[in-house]
Amino acid sequence: MTPRQPDLSVVIPALNEAAHLPYLLQDLSWQKNIQFEVIVVDGGSTDTTVEQCREFSTNSTFKIKTIESQPGRAVQLNKGTAISSADNLLFLHADSRIRNGSLLSNAQKFLSRQRQHNNNQQLCGHFPLKFSSSPGSEDDYYFYESKTYLNKADCINGDQGFWISKEYFNQLGKFDESLPYMEDARLALKIGADNNWITLPGEIETSARRFETEGFTKRQILNSFLCNFNAMSEPGYFEIAGDIYKQQDKADRLRLRPFLKATHRYMYADGAKTALRRWYQTGAYIASNAWQLAFALDCIKNKKHGLAPNADEASALDFYDRHLARIADWPLIKLLTGIVTIVWFYSLFLLR
């Protein structure tokens, strides 16, 4: 009898994830009412990641394929997709946790209904996030968890899981292998440009280890740099920043000054005229994200009233979208925002 084709191919890139991946595989083993396969693409682990995957597969209720690849998340994800069997893909990070045994089946039903209702098989889904953090720091993540319910630009990243049809994934050009990282953000922007994102029911739990190890504020500042240059389509910046990041990868705390210096050099590397254009584009990017200030007000109010991060009450954001969003497109606002950003950047540079 021919085995049934899986409904879903779950692709997981891994590199030295022996301490985290087994928990995700165990979570997946509890998923009900959906037929799926798991493809783990190892990028050259020196721990027991591969051995644990193969050991888990001997008694697994679902098919697990473990393959090896050159390091690089985009390369690994694309290689895993190439051997997938299902028409739909779900990209997950190795340190994700799934606490609900019906998460995947509920998401599949919801996305299928939405695609049928909208007559659009290119609709993609992402899950909201729940951060697992140190006791006492849960409130720090309320705003960021709330953002993961939205479908706005730069609110969707690989931690949330990308559920996408293989046909549409290939049509979009797959993950950009020229990027050392931010490949998820680049694909998310492409999907957002087509207005094809929806929020799936349930949530994925992800570790806050990077924020807590590197420093919450420093990580957010660095993320803002990365998102800005990604939106500006400046791949050269990622080559420079990637080299710096590799040097700090094992450090306990993130050092911002090397990134500040690299950003300064990159801005002016091609002359003053290009630098002015880049600062103007940076101002435009930041102006386009002014909605986050309104949304932060909603989150403060909702949290004060004891509402969960998925609360629908967002009156400040609704007001901004209706009456103020168009202002962000004014050239003068972009210019002024760029000037303010320059002052902030070099003030930060001097303080570091």
Image (cartoon, rainbow, N blue to C red):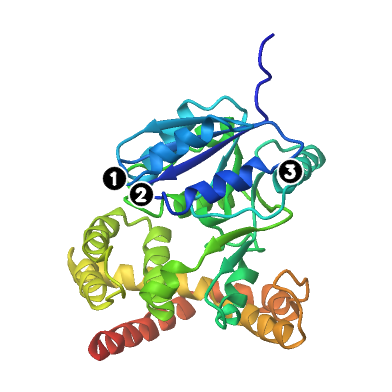
- Would residue 295 appear left or right of 159 to someone viewing this image? right
The disc at residue 267 is: none
- Secondary structure beneath label 1: loop
Q: Pointer 3: what residue?
A: 111
Q: Name the spot of residue 21 as percent of width and height, x first.
A: 48, 48
Q: Residue at x 40, y 37 (%)?
A: 51
Quadrant in the picture for the N terminus? top right
Q: Pointer 2: what residue?
A: 16
Pick whichever of labels 1 and 3 is earlier in the sequence.
1
Q: Pointer 1: what residue?
A: 46
| Viewer-closest of 306 and 21 | 21
Q: Name the spot of residue 320 as percent of width and height, x first.
A: 67, 78
Q: Residue at x 39, y 78 (%)?
A: 215
Q: Nearer the viewer, mark 1 or mark 3?
A: 1
| Viewer-closest of 147 and 132 | 132
Give the Cα distance between marks 2 and 1. Answer: 6 Å
Q: Are marks 2 and 1 in contact (CB under 8 Å)?
A: yes
Q: Name the spot of residue 50 as percent of width and height, x first.
A: 39, 38
Pick whichever of labels 2 and 1 is earlier in the sequence.
2
